[in-house]
Image (cartoon, rainbow, N blue to C red):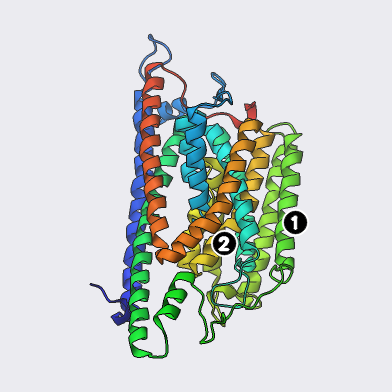
Amino acid sequence: MLNWRKLDISDRTMLAARSKVWWLIFTAITMIGFFVVVSALVAAEPSSSPNQAPENNYVRKAFKFLELNNRQRYEHQWPDMRFCWQIVVGSVLGFLGAAFGSVGGVGGGGIFVPMLALIIGFDPKSSTAISKCMITGAAAATVCYNIRQRHPTLELPLIDYDLALLFQPMLVLGISIGVGFNVIFADWMITVLLIIVFIAMSTKSFLKGIQTWKKETIKKQETARHLELNGELTQHEVTTESKEGKPKSSHGVHLLRLQVSLIENICWKELGLLVVVWILILALQIAKNYSTTCSVEYWVLNFLQIPVTVGVSSYEAVFLYKGRRKIASKGDAVANWRVHKLVIYCGFGVLAGVLGGMLGLGGGFILGPLFLEMGIPPQVSSATATFAMLFSASMSVVEYYLLKRFPIPYALYLAGVATIAAFVGQHVVGKVIKIMGRSSIIIFILAGMIFGSAISLGGLGIAKMIKRIERKEYMGFEDICSYRP
């Protein structure tokens, strides 16, 4: 068995580099698979006329297949809201997804979207929009719970506001881009991208679960060894520490757990900047809704989002680079931030937003693992990712509402279910994890549910693609300039 404590820095660096190389190879394979599917559908697309000569130029044929036109406007599938088994099963799965997602800090989009599409019967685009409503409800409940909590080992709030200020504006910018892609991309394209993202994230979650399991095992062994060496500790005290996750003194008083008021537990300056960004972007979106699509005013309002979001993230990045601010939740006295790392992190924030807006996922699917790679404690990573998701997901809800992409009664009901589930998840599931001492179990469950969703949604998507090819339906890109909800 590999003993990490015996490895020197060079060995660990080499292993980390190999891990990143394999992950890049996996990502490249998935993207190549996506383009292979596109190529297969291009080759299978029949000509518009039986007397038309076959197209010899492959590139021209591909552009013809994906040309922007209005031959068939996208039609939403909104089932009637009535009491039936689909509503019951969907509510149960949505409840479980929100409960587990709130604990893991991933939003639950990997469960909501397949549930909405496969069970209740929404089309993929509407499923994406309603999923954002559910993520917003769950994130709001989780933030209300976490905003009072403290850092597990330091005298800091559980939510890292500096970390959120670096990523959240980029996340909001990516959301706006992703919503536009959701309009442009065809039904089957969103389905294929969903499968790719779900498989990638389930694999990443599974590997993270294994890593967490090993760390928990080592921690339990060290606790048992410490119990043998230190005769002053009792079995009861060690058990209490492992279950509650709170270090205690010999008198049973919690250490590093000073009780502070809610006002003192919030970094108001950083929170104010985040709220200002949210309001400005929301104002731009509302103004854009009253402008003519693809007009000069429309594009000006779109591009005005860039200086707002990039400006705030750059403000935080410059202060981190100069050392005036630090990501205190890491516990480092000094953090040397390099320019290329800050640029890469901001780029990941945009990528998380694009995937979130286009596929109906919470940004936590990317931000959570990224925060862990940065050395952020799991509790802080989950809380901060959910905090950032609250802003980005609510922005998506407003944008989808302006585009009339979801039925309001369904959205209100399912968002309410997710909100209640998030509160239950934070209280009940959190206590269960502490009692068992194995938070990695939730990671394994979540990875399995996401992978199962990818398989189910993949089968449905392939069946739909085959039917559309047989009926010779248009399966290309939509024209955003002529889009009408």
Residue 249 x, y percent position in the rendering: 52, 85
Question: Which of these two is toward me, 198 or 308?
Answer: 198
Residue 257 x, y percent position in the rendering: 60, 77
Secondary structure type for disc 1: helix
Residue 275, compared with residue 342, is above or below; it is: above
Question: Which of these two is toward me, 331 or 179?
Answer: 331
Q: Is any atom of residue 111 visible in this view?
A: yes
Q: Is residue 479 left or right of residue 23?
A: right
Q: Is any atom of residue 58 visible in this view?
A: no
Query: Which quarter of the rendering shows the C terminus?
Result: top right
**At label 2, which amino acid type do we have?**
Ala
Image quarter for residue 62? top left
Q: Which residue is mark 2?
A: 383
Secondary structure type for disc 2: helix
Q: Which mark is residue 276?
A: 1
Q: Is residue 70 left or right of residue 244?
A: right
* Number of residues whose C-alpha sits closer than 10 Å to that of mark 2, classed few (under 14), some (14–19) or many (20 or more): many
Q: Residue at x 59, y 47 (%)?
A: 420
Residue 373 x, y percent position in the rendering: 45, 66
* Number of residues whose C-alpha sits closer than 10 Å to that of mark 1, classed few (under 14), some (14–19) or many (20 or more): some
Residue 405 x, y percent position in the rendering: 62, 32
